[in-house]
Amino acid sequence: MPCAVILTALSVERKAVRSHLTELNEETHPQGTIYERGKFATEGKVWDVGIVETGAGNSPAGIEAERAIAYFNPDVILFVGVAGGIKNVILGDVVAGTKVYGYESGKVGETFKPRPDVGLSTYNMIQRARAEASKNDWLTRLSPQPHPNPTVFVAPIAAGEKVVANIKSDVFKFLEQNYSDALAVEMEGRGVLQAAHANQQVSALIIRGISDLIDGKSAADKSGSQEIAARHASAFAFQVLAKFEIPNQALNSNQTSKETGSNIKQAHSGSGDNVGGDKNTYYDLKGATFGFAGRDYTANIINKNQNINPNSDEDMDLLEILTNYFSNREKPGQHLKSLIAMSKIKIDTAGIDYNLPVRELITSFYVQLLPNTDNYVSFLKVFQRQLPSYSIDEKSFINDLIQNPENRYG
């Protein structure tokens, strides 16, 4: 099932997003962030959608975006909300950001010299936004439909840490002078795109409804313009999601993980410690077997009552899947630590060096995961949700292991 994360800053924006979802349930991240997860059924497919309200500001939006990406492992991340219109827009129009300028960046001397900090929405999302902006299909997601029809622009946006509420202000004049192609100004988009840049497997887009035209902001807000703008932005966002095709890509094969599995198998078919003559009984897996000599990660957790067969195809395949997956993470150690916390398993984490290279990190964790059935199943349930939607074979294989955890033994 494809997965999307939608971030909002305000409760009015969150309510607009929720209205498009069914089967909503609350979930809590181990660090305390509260999410809602629901379903979006459209065009013959169903999206798994996570929602998080970040609060105002680029920094908290970026932090929550990074955390949500690690938690949901989405295919798509969207920020959906309201913004002030700088030029060429009217109340209720929608702007899908091709890029977001972080306009606060610069050097202060006798005058302020801007050093533009620019975040880009991903190419495939921009293309889909342009395609949908050229049609009025998205308006069918609004009830009642507005009149006259709002316009969707696919154009730059500016983001800072200030609420801009006067066209005579220094900030507004600065934006006009230095970011003359920006149609809207807001406070979160740059932070979200920064998180997306660090997770390039995720497609990202910023979508804003125009709730004010800078002057008269308070009056516009009181008139309900935020609710209207949020509904319009949300309707367009779900139209983009409905028509978006996830790139048909497969996980890159990782040769080092195959070598790791091969080394384990070869070592235990020849040089591994086999006490008692039973070829399927191994009492410890020496550090040298995994390529980091002198470190025995399993002496304290594998004993003579646990028959772990390193020649098992299931063991080898799962090790490969884990290693491939974490090799594609920006911060594999932190991500593994997060998944361990989410699965609430009890293992000797002191025996895991989260700064190890991926091959060694996953192998040291893997041999701790095997002995306890509850740990094994709990972690695999969490890990299965993290796999990209196109990893159909991997998801199916792991589901079989969850249903039949005894297959991890020879």
Image (cartoon, rainbow, N blue to C red):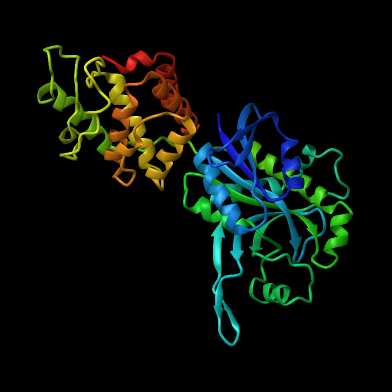
Residue 243 in view, yes or no? no
Q: Nearer the viewer, residue 342 or 320?
A: 342
In the image, residue 70 lies at what x, y percent? Answer: 49, 41
Q: Is residue 400 left or right of residue 239?
A: left
Q: Quadrant of residue 173?
A: bottom right
Q: Nearer the viewer, residue 182 or 212?
A: 212
Vertical position of residue 251 compared to residue 166: above or below: above
Q: Residue at x 77, y 53 (%)?
A: 151
Vertical position of residue 360 compared to residue 385: above or below: below
Q: How many marks?
A: 0
Q: Quadrant of residue 37?
A: top right
User: In the orientation shown, which residue stands out farthest toward the bottom?
Assistant: 110
In the image, residue 220 lies at what x, y percent? Answer: 86, 58
Figure quadrant of the N terminus: top right
Q: Nearer the viewer, residue 189 or 408?
A: 408
In the image, residue 192 lies at what x, y percent? Answer: 58, 53
Q: Is residue 192 left or right of residue 263?
A: right
Vertical position of residue 189 compared to residue 368: above or below: below
Q: Residue at x 72, y 49 (%)?
A: 10
Q: Residue at x 76, y 42 (%)?
A: 16
Q: Residue at x 73, y 64 (%)?
A: 163
Vertical position of residue 391 compared to residue 186: above or below: above
